Amino acid sequence: MSTYKIAVIAGDGIGKEVVPAAIACLDRIAEVHSLDLEFTYFDWGSEYYLQHGRMMPVDGLEQLAAHHAIFLGAVGSPEVSDAESLWGLLIPIRREFQQYINLRPVKTLDGVTSPLAAKDPIDLLIVRENNEGEYSEVGGRMYRGLPHESAVQETIFTRLGVTRVTRYAAGLAASRRGHLTSATKSNGIVHTMPFWDEVVEETARLYPEVSLTSELVDALAAHLVLRPWTFDVIVASNLFGDILSDLGSSVTGSIGLAPSANLNPEGDFPSLFEPVHGSAPDIAGKGLANPVGQIWSGAMMLEHLGHPEAADHLQAAFESALREGFGTRDVGGTSSTAEFTAAVLSAIDALAANQADPTPSPVS
């Protein structure tokens, strides 16, 4: 049996509540599927920053590199600026380990009411370029505090970056319904976005079974609200993908549901799995946090590690718990974090028992 070494960073706020919930579910799944998951815990985050002046140790990336995957809860605190917390932990991990794909599923879940009146099921994937684009480090500020103070931030697209994210997205579309949508703004951003469009179109032509639609991001945002069920796979730049995926999770019921995977598809470095939600300091410590995004991220981690049956089992379990009415308050339920987790654990066991004893029901 292979041992999978998982680095765990619960981080800040509700991360410290949803990560233990998800790990309890992963432990139960590992037991059922005979997997050896070895978790190593790192107390990095905003509290670490307040004590040490850094979000992680100087050799933090070196420590993480010894693992097969990274399981992250949330990062962010009112006491630490977002620039410090994000650029001191998550972004260095994404870039050092070449996690150039950010994969975010958006799916209707039974038991969760969408704010949309339409009942059509939503099932799409957002593939966000994760290493360049609008989140570059190129730029700066001049004349601080003076009337002519100015700031410059450069957007950088490379042919390599746009090609590889499009290849990944088109490959997913080819395995699904065959429709790829590219988010652009080439009518207003006259250099980088036309380049994005050209490279996306060139790359998508390598997948004749996939149809490509290029849509302006403002119209696409409206489309995601009005007709989200018509989408299959969306490929987007770093900023556009970030915004669209939050919107997508909201139209399915709650950002607390949304998982994500920061992938190095080649497996040369560990990939990172985290919920889309933030640290939610307003509800931290109250037992109200929705652990679905973290649990679902755990299922994506199992899939990435090569265990799709275990991943499907975990996803079926949390979907069952939602269907049975055990949702947390953000999705209209009354369950605490612990109560929902207990429901998922029970569902894992029930599904395992059904698998072990597939006796057909009597036919009347």
Image: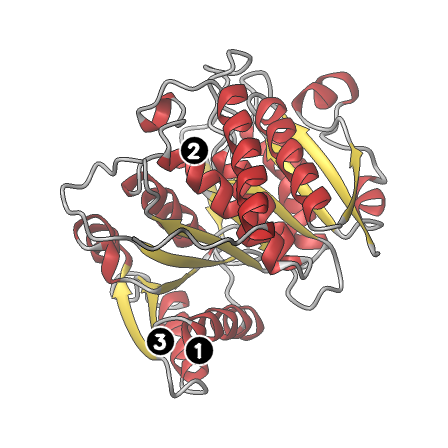
Circle 1 packing at 10 Å, graded few (<14), some (14-19), many (20+), is some
Which amino acid lies under the numbered mark 3 shown in the image of this protein? Gly
Q: CA distance from mark 3 to mark 1?
A: 19 Å
Q: Residue at x 37, y 21 (%)?
A: 329
Which amino acid lies under the numbered mark 1 shown in the image of this protein? Val
Residue 178 is marked as 3
Residue closer to the observer: 182 or 318: 318
Q: Label 1: which residue?
A: 199
Query: Quadrant of the rendered structure where residue 252 is?
Result: top left
Q: Is residue 88 left or right of residue 321?
A: right
Q: State whether residue 263 appears in this view.
A: no
Under circle 2, the secondary element is helix
Residue closer to the observer: 157 or 46: 46
Circle 3 packing at 10 Å, graded few (<14), some (14-19), many (20+), is some
Q: Is residue 93 left or right of residue 308?
A: right
Of badges 1 and 2, nearer the viewer stands: 2
Of badges 3 and 1, nearer the viewer stands: 3
Under circle 3, the secondary element is loop
Q: Residue at x 46, y 27 (%)?
A: 290
Residue 348 on image: x %, y %: 56, 40
Mark 1 vs mark 2: which is more N-terminal? 1
Q: Label 2: which residue?
A: 256
Q: Is residue 53 left or right of residue 115?
A: right
Residue closer to the observer: 332 or 58: 332
Q: Is residue 110 left or right of residue 242?
A: left
Circle 2 packing at 10 Å, graded few (<14), some (14-19), many (20+), is many
Q: Residue at x 37, y 32 (%)?
A: 324
Residue 220 versus residue 330 in the image, above or below: below
Mark 3 vs mark 1: which is more N-terminal? 3
Residue 210 on image: x %, y %: 36, 80
Residue 69 on image: x %, y %: 72, 49
